[in-house]
Amino acid sequence: MDPLNRGRVESWLRYSEGLGPYYRNRDTSPSSPPPLPANTAPTKELQTAAPKRVPAPAPAPPALRVAPSLSPSVAIKPAAPAPSLFEIVDRVADDTLERIREDIGDCTRCRLHKGRTKIVFGVGNPKAELMFVGEGPGRDEDIQGEPFVGRAGKLLTQMIEAMGLRREDVYIANVVKCRPPENRLPEKDEIAICSPFLTRQIDVIRPKVICCLGSCSAQTLLATTQGISRFRGEWFDFRGAKLIPTYHPAYLLRNPAAKSDVWKDLQKVMAHLGLQPKRR
Ligand code: SF4
């Protein structure tokens, strides 16, 4: 299998773990940590967090016996068979943003659903060459259902326009789709449950450049625990795209002096995409 499809299948399998028994491949329950997707290796070595061992699945409950006296009409139906690898590959190859949104549904997979107003899926050009990834919705985003629409969002829009683009030219999404309470950072388990949706969005959009906004986004996609200041502005390979981490616009609102660093990072993106800065 080629590396792109392998990465997609692995992403789908991780995602499908949260979907229920129909999608679980019981024969492949890992007894050791799953391998990282082959095409997520950063070009620069990062000290990665030790992958968590996936707990062994709970033993299957004893098979239910149907009493001989019961009529066949009340016999217990066998579980739906797990999809074959080919079915999984087909489904991954046919993935769309609409299907991902459908799969999210009225999601209650993690605790963040309790405090949300709207799921914030993502917005922008589905064929964007440039994708921005933040950490999670804030108050304004939660109300409007769109990422980066508050003060930090306005600054991001200005940054995009300074690059010679319009907001609708790029795609903007977050690691988690529901607002963490009190605007705290998403927690590890919330990220683990929700981030496969982001991975699928990236695989569908296939941007040339992914710009991670802030440490949560960069640490999630690069699977590292290092602080963003250690690797901000450097290029990494991620699922066929070039990935560059930079500071979150909310951080720039608190630390305007860091804007020059971010502008340097964005200039690297512009050079990679052949963009001309907007004339002032
Ligand atoms: S954050 Fe993601 S996984 Fe959690 S409830 Fe929202 S959509 Fe579902």
Image (cartoon, rainbow, N blue to C red):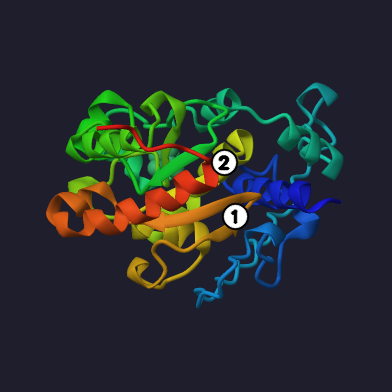
Q: Residue at x 69, y 73 (%)?
A: 32
| Mark closest to the chain's N terminus, 2 or 1 | 2
Which quadrant of the structure image shows residue 280? Answer: top left
Visible residue check, residue 71 = yes
Who is closer to the viewer here, 123 or 165?
Answer: 165
Who is closer to the viewer here, 209 or 118?
Answer: 209
The amino acid at mark 2 is: Ile
From what the image shows, is residue 206 above or below residue 72? below
Q: Residue at x 63, y 27 (%)?
A: 96
Residue at the outermost front position:
279
Q: Is residue 60 left or right of residue 115?
A: right
The amino acid at mark 1 is: Phe
Q: Is residue 254 left or right of residue 174?
A: left
Residue 74's spot in the image, x, y percent? 76, 26
Helix, strand, or loop for circle 1?
strand
Helix, strand, or loop for circle 2?
helix
Residue 19's spot in the image, x, y percent? 59, 41
Residue 224's spot in the image, x, y percent? 47, 69
Q: Residue at x 66, y 49 (%)?
A: 240
From what the image shows, is residue 92 above or below residue 2? above
Residue 176's spot in the image, x, y percent? 40, 44
Label annotation for residue 202: 2
Asked if marks 2 and 1 touch (Cβ < 8 Å), the reply is yes
Label annotation for residue 124: none
Label annotation for residue 238: 1
Visible residue check, residue 194 = no
